[in-house]
Image (spheres, rainbow, N blue to C red):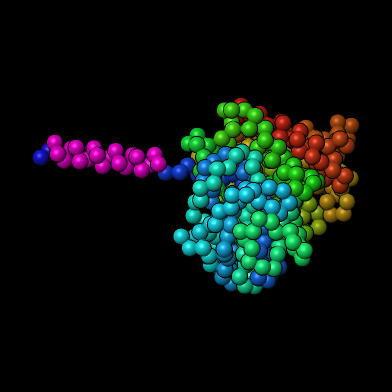
């Protein structure tokens, strides 16, 4: 009898091990952090393009109603391999489900993850997500600086081969979609980049995937040891570390969104933090006393984020803040704001609090005028790099840190 029980126990353990082995290994292949409430949308289909940074055999999508004021009804929802323009590749269309249902209702402030769907995706492959909105949405949930064309068509055509008939309109914001998760080989993991408009890619052209995290994802694919590492972009143009958005600043603070937009991403192993310049800018003409932050407060916020990352068993890298001399309006530095930037950068370089240093300031500044971007890297607004600058940033990452 004891032998029989022992054999039964071993069989149960083997079955459990097989079930665990068969479980998909999910990583974040693409992300766009929700940053603001958008317009109320009428019933229509929206097709949006996302690019997976890693290869996989199954995919699922996260949709958000973070800024909604009422339950959001969505569906049907389709995902396909992108062709060109608003077209999809023939035979690749997949209808997504949510707990096996073709439609879903998302409560205000909440998000949902679709059921997995079989779809073989290559690294750096673009996918087309099509959402049908069956009724007026109320305030939508946006990622404003998408730098990617979306197509809007007043009909239920989520599975259509193309969404570019006469009457279709285009937009350059993300609506409701925040994550693409990919079932990849077991070593796969994700690097999340948390930042502001520079991480968001402002200064690069639409539909080119020319943000610096995009260039980094492409670079990883050139190394077989690193090709299973996904890159998730959690940048928000106009975002701050310490305080939530108040025009012209945008989005929940990094302290408020760090868990959702970085720590909880499937497969996350590393985080890059490149943020703080908007905290400095807001302090030049503070709308409230709370906005008048010091370099020491920004550093304290960074220390808080480092502690949270380390408590989750993650590595976190710090990136120095870029110069913005000659920028216009509120963004133009003063002697006081430049002193704060230098103080924050000095701490990032010397304190040893981060697990690694990305000295983008030293990389992109003009040696003759260190408070300004080198002209070859300047997009023209003297604040954001151009695509050459973004390529240089990605090329400066020491890939040995990922091995």
Numbered marks: total: 0
Q: Report whether residue 337 is seen.
A: yes
Residue displayed at 51% across by 59% down: 97
Q: Residue furthest front?
A: 90
- Where residue 251 appears, as percent x and y from the top left, is 68, 58
Where residue 398 appears, x then y in whole percent?
66, 29
Residue 363 to residue 58: above or below: above
Q: Which residues are magenta?
A: 3-22
Relative to 144, 316 lies left or right: left
From the viewer's side, name the closer residue of 373 and 91: 91
Q: Is residue 20 magenta?
A: yes
> x, y percentage for residue 390?
76, 38
Task: Determine the residue positioned at 55% across, 60% down.
Answer: 111
* Residue placed most toward the observer, 330 or 47: 47
- Identity of the residue drawn at 64% across and 73% down: 136
Which image quarter is the C terminus in? top right
Tell me if I can see residue 300 in this picture.
Answer: no
Which of the 4 quarters of the picture holds residue 243?
bottom right
Residue at 86%, 31% (x, y): give it: 367
Quadrant of the rendered structure where residue 149 is?
A: bottom right
Instruction: Name the quarter where the N terminus is drawn.
Output: top left
Vertical position of residue 7 compared to residue 158: above or below: above
Q: Main secondary structure of the magenta part?
A: helix
Nearer to me, 302 or 317:
317
Q: Residue furthest left?
A: 1
**Residue 293, magenta (yes or no):** no
Instruction: Give the quarter of the image for residue 319.
Output: top right
Is 340 situated left or right of 334 in this image?
Answer: left
Q: Give above or below for 365 relative to 238.
A: above
């Amino acid at each position: 009898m004891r032998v029989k029980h022992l054999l039964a126990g071993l069989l149960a353990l083997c079955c459990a091990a097989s079930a665990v082995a068969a479980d998909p290994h999910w990583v974040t292949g693409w992300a766009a952090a929700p940053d603001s409430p958008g317009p109320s949308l009428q019933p229509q289909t929206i097709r949006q393009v996302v690019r997976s940074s890693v290869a996989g055999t199954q995919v699922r999508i996260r949709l958000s109603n973070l800024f909604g004021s009422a339950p959001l009804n969505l569906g049907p929802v389709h995902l396909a391999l992108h062709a060109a323009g608003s077209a999809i590749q023939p035979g690749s269309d997949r209808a997504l489900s949510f707990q096996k249902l073709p439609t879903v209702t998302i409560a205000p402030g909440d998000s949902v993850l679709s059921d997995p769907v079989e779809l073989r995706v290559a690294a750096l492959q673009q996918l087309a997500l099509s959402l049908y909105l069956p009724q007026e949405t109320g305030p939508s949930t946006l990622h404003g600086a998408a730098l990617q064309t979306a197509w809007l068509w007043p009909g239920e055509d989520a599975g259509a081969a193309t969404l570019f008939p006469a009457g279709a309109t285009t937009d350059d914001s993300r609506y409701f979609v925040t994550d693409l998760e990919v079932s990849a080989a077991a070593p796969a993991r994700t690097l999340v980049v948390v930042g502001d408009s520079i991480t968001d890619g402002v200064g690069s052209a639409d539909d080119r995937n020319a943000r610096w995290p995009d260039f980094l994802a492409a670079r990883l694919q050139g190394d077989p040891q690193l090709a299973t590492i996904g890159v998730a972009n959690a940048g928000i143009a106009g975002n701050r570390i310490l305080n939530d958005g108040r025009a012209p600043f945008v989005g929940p603070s990094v302290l408020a969104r760090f868990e959702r937009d970085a720590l909880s991403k499937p497969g996350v192993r590393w985080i890059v933090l490149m943020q703080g310049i908007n905290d400095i800018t807001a302090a030049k003409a503070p709308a409230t006393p709370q906005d008048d932050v010091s370099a020491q407060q920004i550093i304290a916020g960074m220390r808080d984020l480092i502690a949270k990352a380390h408590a989750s068993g993650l590595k976190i890298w710090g990136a120095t803040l870029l110069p913005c001399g000659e920028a216009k309006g509120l963004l133009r530095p003063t002697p006081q704001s430049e002193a704060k930037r230098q103080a924050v950068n000095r701490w990032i370089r010397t304190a040893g609090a981060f697990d690694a240093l990305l000295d983008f300031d030293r990389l992109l500044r003009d040696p003759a005028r260190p408070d300004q971007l080198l002209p070859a890297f300047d997009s023209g607004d003297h604040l954001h790099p151009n695509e050459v600058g973004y390529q240089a940033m990605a090329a400066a990452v020491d890939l040995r840190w990922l091995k």
